[in-house]
Image (tube, rainbow, N blue to C red):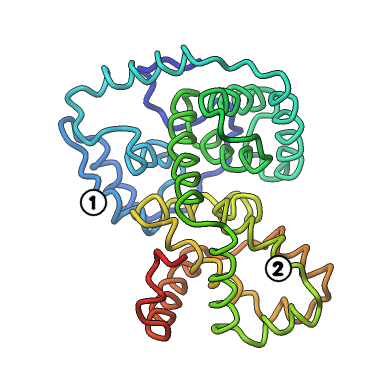
Amino acid sequence: MSSPLSSSSSSPSRRRTSPPVHSALARDEFVELLESEVFIDVNRLRKCARYGIPEDLRGEVWKFLLGVEKSDRSNEFTQRRARYESYCEIDKENVEVSKRVRGEVNRYLQRTKKEELLDPHTAPAIFEAVICAYLNCNNSIEYSPALVQLCAPFVITMSAEYDVYSCFERLVDTLSESSLASNINKRIAQFLSYFRTLLPELYNYFEEEELDVGEWTSSWLRNLLAKELPTACVLTLWDVYFAQPDFIEFHPFVCLAILQHLKDSLEDLEQSEIRSMLLRLPKMNMLRIVSQAHNIRSEIQTRYGSLASPRSL
């Protein structure tokens, strides 16, 4: 396991790929913020992250955005050491869960093989340890294959296993709290109401094709599209999400923006093809999708008034 002294965001379980083109000016601003020795200006970090984060800095930035690393760096090593030791003490043995995680990770690696994001020799053990540790500490939460997809972005972007765990724990806790606060059936009903209002032709077409809306809407709303989007799209989308405090509440509008973006393509497909596309979404410009999601939220709030506050979803 990586030492708490390690601060690199490059994951050893990851295969190196060519970094994406990113504005040199924007990158310099991230570097300047992260190199501050006394205090990290998280508000500025959030503003920068809304437009995407450079690949090699993503893991480090996410830790600050998720509150895993503290903005005050005066006790940085002590806090990092405490997280490392705490993770080391967690029981990571769970034979039944390990077997299921291993199977799902193998499927994930096969599906993303062309992207060469993870080393198939080292990554599975990290997934198993992190997910088993989390479930052993949270007995009320049952294993779901979605946990692998939710864990994958952190395995891809972070070098230290205890950092992967800390960020994964923070995200899954947030999703679990959201589920407790708002019943999923109520959220689906509200989402479909907005879908019907915003895109009536597409909604009616889905009904004509007798599409099982519950199958895809539940997964979309529960798991931040981690299962459906290509990995590169998930990473960019999560850059934006982690940069804002209400990303769980904003997420349904991103889902609506995706439907709007794919409307013409979906209306040319039959039921089985629609289902396949919704469960395995094509690559999209996620920053444009996010921009459209803001417009949709404003439009729906204008139509519904107070009923369309983000918390209603």
Question: Residue 266 appears at what percent x and percent y?
Answer: 72, 76
The tag on residue 44 is 1
Q: Residue at x 46, y 71 (%)?
A: 293
The residue lying at 37 percent from left, 26 percent from top is 7
- Closer mark to the observer between disc 1 and disc 2: 2
Above or below, 177 against 219 in this view is above
Quarter-of-image position of residue 192? bottom right
- Give the image location of residue 222, x and y in percent: 57, 53
Relative placement, left or right, of 94 versus 251 is right
Q: Residues within 10 Å of mark 1 (few under 14, many from 20)?
A: few
* x 46%, y 23%: residue: 162
Amino acid found under the numbered disc labelled 1: Arg
Q: Specify whether 306 is left or right of 293.
A: left
Identify residue type, mark 2: Val
To which residue does mark 2 refer? 213
- Residue 62 location, x and y as percent? 39, 41
Relative to 201, is 10 on the left or the right?
Answer: left
Residue 214, image quadrant: bottom right
Is residue 133 positioned above or below 43 on the image?
above
Question: Above or below — where is 104 with respect to 135?
Answer: below
Foreground pick, 115 / 199: 199
**Left or right: where does residue 23 sit relative to residue 226?**
left
Question: For this rendering, which residue is in front, 222 or 49?
Answer: 222
Does 184 sit above or below residue 180? Answer: below
Looking at the image, which residue is at 51% across and 15% down?
1
- Label 1: state its secondary structure: helix
- Counting from the top left corner in percent of width and height, residue 69 is at 31, 32
